[in-house]
């Protein structure tokens, strides 16, 4: 298992090394057609999980109260002009919520609550909901980064960008976006993620994306306190990407 993890970690080692060496702004400057390649194909809501790429993203059950979490997702969906809602197997955010409520965290029950949540949000908005197939396996996360983004884009459509969680800061309050950031960091650095394989040379990346330099500076400042909990194994970087 550890060998398999190590081998998976190697896959994006060069990309991460280059980013650490050049910095994200300089790195993306070298990527021809990035803006076109990463254009959204739909506005379907998916989890922030790196295994459910594309569209727009919110983690389910961010608040301790069920109803508050539903309200939050409904507001998010309206702001983001969502077209549909999905839920998925092995959702870390749903599992964490069940854990906090001392409830059954089996794969079946996590899926059951993920569906229940998506169904309620969809009904409130009169949208459809469906199961999103995860790319990869239950119980294993290969994210090397989290995109903390004020711009809509899909990093998964360009393999020159690291595999990552996606946070749509644009449609969330700071408080909720930072909660998602904490969830992403806990998963990535825990036993279901690459965990102890992250180092100063091969850090987990928080990639702040904004439409302007000014906004990027503000958002980098915003994630600093959360990032600093993890010391040098988590690195904050970012770049400016025009809105399309
Ligand atoms: Zn999830």
Image: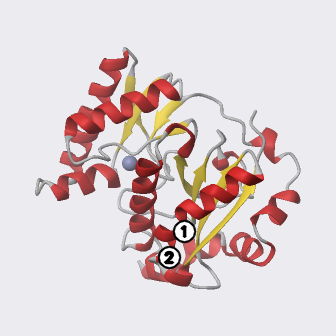
Q: Nearer the viewer, residue 161 or 243?
A: 243
Rendered location of residue 15, percent (x, y): 73, 69
Answer few, some or many: residues within 10 Å of disc 2's Cα (few below 14, many 20 plus, some between 14 and 19).
Answer: few
Q: Is residue 157 visible?
A: yes
Rendered location of residue 98, percent (x, y): 19, 52
Rendered location of residue 203, percent (x, y): 59, 77
Relative side of 43 to 27, left or right: left
Q: Is residue 53 visible?
A: no
Name the residue located 60 percent from the left edge and 28 percent from the top edge.
42
Answer few, some or many: residues within 10 Å of disc 1's Cα (few below 14, many 20 plus, some between 14 and 19).
Answer: few
| Tag 2 residue | 228
- Residue 56: image quadrant is top right
- Element class at badge 2: helix
Count of marks placed on residues:
2
Q: Nearer the viewer, residue 225 or 69?
A: 225
Quarter placement of the N terminus = bottom left
Relative side of 244 to 203, left or right: right
Q: Nearer the viewer, residue 79 or 112?
A: 79
Relative side of 94 to 169, left or right: left
The answer to whether the residues at label 1 and label 2 have Cβ atoms under 8 Å apart is yes
Quarter placement of the C terminus = top right
- Residue 163: image quadrant is bottom right
Name the residue located 45 percent from the left edge and 56 percent from the top edge.
178
Name the residue located 60 percent from the left edge and 85 percent from the top edge.
200
Rendered location of residue 198, percent (x, y): 53, 80
Vertical position of residue 29 compared to residue 116: above or below: below
| Tag 1 residue | 224
- Element class at badge 1: helix
Give the alpha-carbon distance from disc 1 to disc 2, as whole Å. Answer: 6 Å
Vertical position of residue 46 compared to residue 184: above or below: above
Rendered image: mark on residue 64:
none
Name the residue located 23 percent from the left edge and 33 percent from the top edge.
116
């Amino acid at each position: 298992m550890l060998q398999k993890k190590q081998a998976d970690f190697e896959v994006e080692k060069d990309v991460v090394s280059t980013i650490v060496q050049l910095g994200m702004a300089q790195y993306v400057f070298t990527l021809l057609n990035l803006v076109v390649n990463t254009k959204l194909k739909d506005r379907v809501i998916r989890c922030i999980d790196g295994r459910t790429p594309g569209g727009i993203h919110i983690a389910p059950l961010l608040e301790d109260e069920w109803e508050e979490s539903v309200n939050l997702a409904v507001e998010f969906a309206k702001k983001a002009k969502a077209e549909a809602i999905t839920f998925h197997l092995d959702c870390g955010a749903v599992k964490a919520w069940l854990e906090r409520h001392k409830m059954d965290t089996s794969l079946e029950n996590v899926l059951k609550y993920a569906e229940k949540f998506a169904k309620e949000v969809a009904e409130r908005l009169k949208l459809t909901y469906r199961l999103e197939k995860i790319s990869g396996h239950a119980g294993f996360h290969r994210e090397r980064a989290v995109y903390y983004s004020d711009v809509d884009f899909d990093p998964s459509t360009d393999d020159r960008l690291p595999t990552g969680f996606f946070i749509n800061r644009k449609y969330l309050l700071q408080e909720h976006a930072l909660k998602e950031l904490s969830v992403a960091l806990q998963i990535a650095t825990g036993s279901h993620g690459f965990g102890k394989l992250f180092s100063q040379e091969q850090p987990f990346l928080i990639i702040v994306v904004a439409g302007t330099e000014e906004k990027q500076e503000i958002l980098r400042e915003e994630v600093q306190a959360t990032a600093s909990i993890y010391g040098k194994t988590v690195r904050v970087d970012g770049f400016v990407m025009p809105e399309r």
